[in-house]
Amino acid sequence: MAIAGIPNYMLAAQLVEFNEPYKIHKVPTPESLGPYDVLIKVAVASLCHTDGMVSAGVMGTKLPCIGSHEGAGTVVRLGSSVTDFKEGDRVMAGLPRSRCGHCPDCLGDENYRQYCPNLAGHVGVTLDGAFAEYMIVDGRESSRLPDDVSFETAAPLACAGCTVWRGILQTDLKKGETVAIVGAGGGLGHLGCQFAKALGIMVVGIDARDEGLALARDSGADVTIDARQEKEKVVGEVMKVTGGMGADATVNVSDNGQAAALACAVTKMHGTMIQIAQPTNVSVPFHELVFRDVRIKGSLICSRLEAERMLKIVAEHKISVKTNPFFGLGELPNLIELAHGGKMQGKAVVVVDEEEVNRVKGGETDSI
């Protein structure tokens, strides 16, 4: 029997075999909730680069698994210990589920808790995700949406936004300083441009696609540089616009094999390069690390408090996500084809529940 109007079965896109397309079919709707779990009715889900890694079998995923770790929707059921949400709240899904609460990361700084090594898993990676009509998220990791942040904006922020937002924060730059973003015109990069500008940081956007360079400019990059030039020319252009010093810090969101080396090369001596992209190996010439003392820091998703600050910045500065919307889970094959075609600007999203997306919430209407 359906619970509180929730159907027994829902449409979902499951990965049932690695390196094969999603199987789009009816599966049982989640019923059993842990104390801190929240069941949301998915409004919009987004495709992320990591979804391809999941599909390739490199993330330790047990099959079958519903894809997508970028989702936003409306709360329809609450676990017994959830106090931060109520039914009807609009939320951005948190990726981690069931932190242990007693490891050094859980007991340490708030912005390291998402690194808990004893998690039950991450939605859409090792646990069922947002390519479905309903999904379970952890109420301690998810964030309530401001009234004027749409579902279409929120879904890509769940991973892409949270990831590049933390990368920008990890640079520790102040107003007036300069960040270079390698891959500035991609799904993460164009958000990084906007986040940095909202914090008063000058942005040098580096990309290797005409579409990417255009999107970086549209996203507020003060300078854009074509990475298809010889490395020395790219470095020279960065030096020219930074008074010969190089960028105060660099964020690399490109998984190109040479991107990390380029990111370090355009960073000033003693500066920091934040590595977000996830190629198989991160390769950097020794002289960047030894002779120029460039420090490399890895960074993953942000914490809940950092995510809430991000959403506030998104609302206040009217930050936009360049999206390519598809309507209905049945359109996933077309969405994936576009995303893998090399010409897409921004993020590919699927509107799972068009009616929910379009209804008025808090005086605002989500619209595509």
Image: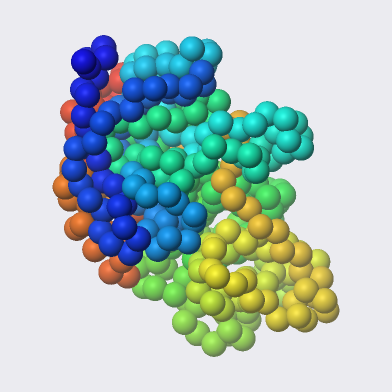
x and y percentages locating residue 52 in the rendered image: 39, 60
Would residue 202 appear left or right of 122 to someone viewing this image? right
Q: Quadrant of residue 105?
A: top right
Name the colour scheme. rainbow
Q: Is residue 68 left or right of residue 265?
A: left
Q: Position of residue 203 (x, y in %)?
A: 57, 59
Left or right, 188 with reference to 289: left
Q: Residue at x 66, y 37 (%)?
A: 113
Residue 343 in view (yes/no): no
Name the residue nearer the viewer: 240 or 163. Answer: 163
Percent of width and height locating residue 319 = 44, 42
- Pick the quarter of the image with the C terminus: top left
Q: Quick check: 201 above or below 269? A: above
**Position in image of residue 169 (x %, y %):** 65, 47
Which residue corresponds to the image point at 67% horizontal and 72% vertical from the top-left? Answer: 264
Front-lying residue, 290 or 23: 23
| Up/down of 93 relative to 284, above or below | above
Residue for point 50% across, 77% down: 227
Quarter of the image with the N terminus is top left
* Residue 360 shows in the view: yes
